[in-house]
Image: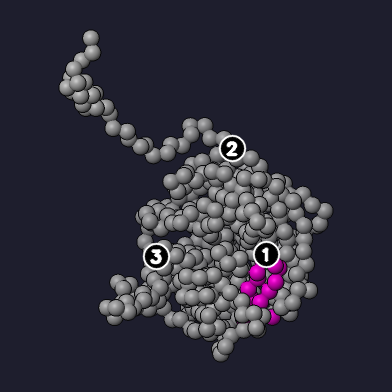
């Protein structure tokens, strides 16, 4: 016998009461993680010195990548016969074409073993003036290159900013608890908070005087046009020492550093003038915590390296950092894979070092002071290309080679574009 309509409603309501709410648990780490497959790369060399407007042979230059517009900026460095450079170039890497960013007025001093960042507040893509066929510039807003580091004969505490729209250099003297002047430090821009992070470096007078200090430099706030008031931010560039209570990397310079997620950056290698390092650390800007990467694998880049090239990209569930060449002139290429969860968390416990097999007939000279970058060719972003630019070899011969490294994997992604 079927229950009455009212009874059926009551029974339905009763069953709803006993239903347990669905709780979404955070993504868990697999108990037994699978070691990521070894990277296989195909290598070829392209000479760039015959390209029009190509920078001359150099090492210890700095670079900043504009992935949204397919541009790579290169500034400074030193070359043959002790020559120092203060030129700024832009490489449109899908066309292999260089543009020299000629200042409208003044120039910055020659810098080497320094660093530059791209501070981009523009809302549009970079466009080229078709009439002049020379300079690239932002469509709107402001984009600028900020340089900081080692002058030709001394260290400088000032920064130099190049406005990519107005093509003007300006000198910046930040206030606050300014760090000691150094070279070989990291200099990273956090777009989310409009803040610059500087770590490590060494003084000019003694290469053994390395530091392990971390500083932030707040970028000036903008004026609110409606209220005509400034946002709650520094009125000018302002340095501040970051105090940490946890373990942190030992003093060093000439190491690799880059972002591996929105709020976490990685450093690897370096030297203090007496000892070379092979350890890797990550720093989370939201928690102010340094963490030593302790890979599951026992093999790693032995004896350490410094002034080496490195690049970060994403491959499957892993953030991968590739390091190549450097001093004391190792020839091996290594990859550090660090697990990244779908919610953005970095799982440092699930990490691996692996050597990278590079195929190709071209012999590459061992070098230091070069730079490495990620670019994407063709219509698909899933087939990126890595390349190494410039550098000096063991005989102090400078190069303008562009070493192209094609990854054979089909599931690789470029961090910052597809992630």
Q: Earlier in the sequence, mark 1 or mark 2?
A: 2
In x, y percent, where is residue 15?
24, 23
Quick check: marks 1 and 2 in contact, CB under 8 Å? Answer: no
Question: Which disc number belongs to residue 81?
Answer: none
Q: How dense is the environment of label 1, judged by Cα within 10 Å: few (below 14), some, or many (20 and up)?
A: few
For the point 62% across and 51% down, which residue is it?
A: 382
Q: Which residue is mark 2?
A: 35
Circle 1: element type: loop
Above or below, 6 relative to 223: above
Front-most of 113 and 197?
A: 197
Q: How dense is the environment of label 3, judged by Cα within 10 Å: few (below 14), some, or many (20 and up)?
A: few
Q: Which residue is mark 3?
A: 193
For the point 49% across and 46% down, which residue is it?
A: 340
Gap in Å between the C-alphas at discs 1 and 3? 31 Å
Circle 3: element type: loop
Front-most of 252 and 15?
A: 15
Gap in Å between the C-alphas at discs 1 and 2? 33 Å
Which region of the structure is painted magenta? Answer: 83-101
For the point 28% across and 32% down, which residue is it?
A: 21
Tell me if I can see residue 184 in this picture.
Answer: no
Q: Earlier in the sequence, mark 1 or mark 3?
A: 1
In x, y percent, where is residue 188?
49, 65
Q: Earlier in the sequence, mark 2 or mark 3?
A: 2
Q: Which residue is mark 1?
A: 94
Front-most of 272 and 399?
A: 399
């Amino acid at each position: 016998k079927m229950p009455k309509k009212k009874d059926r409603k009551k029974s339905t309501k009763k069953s709803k009461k006993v239903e347990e709410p669905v709780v979404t648990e955070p993504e868990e780490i697999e108990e037994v993680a699978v070691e990521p497959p070894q990277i296989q790369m195909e290598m070829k060399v392209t000479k760039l010195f015959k390209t029009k407007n190509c920078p001359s042979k150099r090492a210890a230059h700095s670079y900043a990548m504009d992935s949204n517009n397919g541009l790579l900026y290169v500034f400074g460095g030193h070359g043959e016969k002790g020559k120092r450079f203060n030129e700024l170039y832009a490489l449109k890497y899908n066309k292999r074409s260089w543009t020299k960013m000629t200042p409208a007025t003044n120039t910055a001093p020659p810098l080497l073993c320094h660093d530059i960042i791209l501070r981009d507040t523009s809302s549009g893509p970079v466009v080229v003036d078709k009439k002049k066929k020379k300079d690239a510039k932002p469509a709107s807003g402001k984009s600028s290159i900020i340089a900081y580091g080692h002058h030709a004969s001394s260290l400088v505490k000032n920064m130099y900013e190049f406005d990519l729209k107005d093509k003007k250099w300006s000198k910046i003297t930040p206030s606050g608890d300014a760090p000691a002047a150094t070279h070989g430090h990291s200099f990273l821009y956090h777009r989310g908070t409009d803040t610059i992070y500087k770590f490590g470096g060494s003084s000019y007078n003694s290469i053994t005087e390395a530091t392990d200090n971390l500083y932030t430099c707040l970028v000036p706030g903008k004026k609110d046009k409606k209220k005509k008031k400034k946002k709650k931010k520094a009125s000018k560039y302002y340095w501040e020492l970051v105090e940490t209570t946890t373990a942190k990397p030992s003093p060093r310079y000439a190491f690799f550093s880059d972002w591996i997620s929105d709020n976490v950056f990685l450093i690897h290698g370096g030297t203090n003038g007496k000892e070379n390092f092979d350890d890797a650390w990550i720093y989370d800007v939201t928690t102010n915590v340094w963490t030593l990467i302790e890979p599951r694998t026992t093999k790693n880049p032995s004896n350490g390296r410094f002034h080496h090239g490195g690049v970060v990209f994403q491959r499957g569930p892993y953030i991968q950092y590739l390091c190549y060449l450097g001093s004391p002139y190792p020839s091996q290429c290594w990859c550090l894979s660090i697990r990244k969860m779908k919610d953005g968390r970095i799982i440092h416990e699930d990490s691996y070092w692996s050597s990278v097999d590079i195929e190709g007939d071209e012999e590459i000279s061992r070098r230091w002071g070069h730079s490495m970058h990620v670019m994407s060719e063709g219509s698909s972003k899933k087939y990126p290309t890595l390349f190494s630019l410039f550098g000096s070899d063991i005989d102090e011969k400078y190069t303008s080679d562009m070493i192209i490294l094609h990854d054979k994997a089909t599931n690789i992604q470029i961090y910052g574009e597809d992630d």
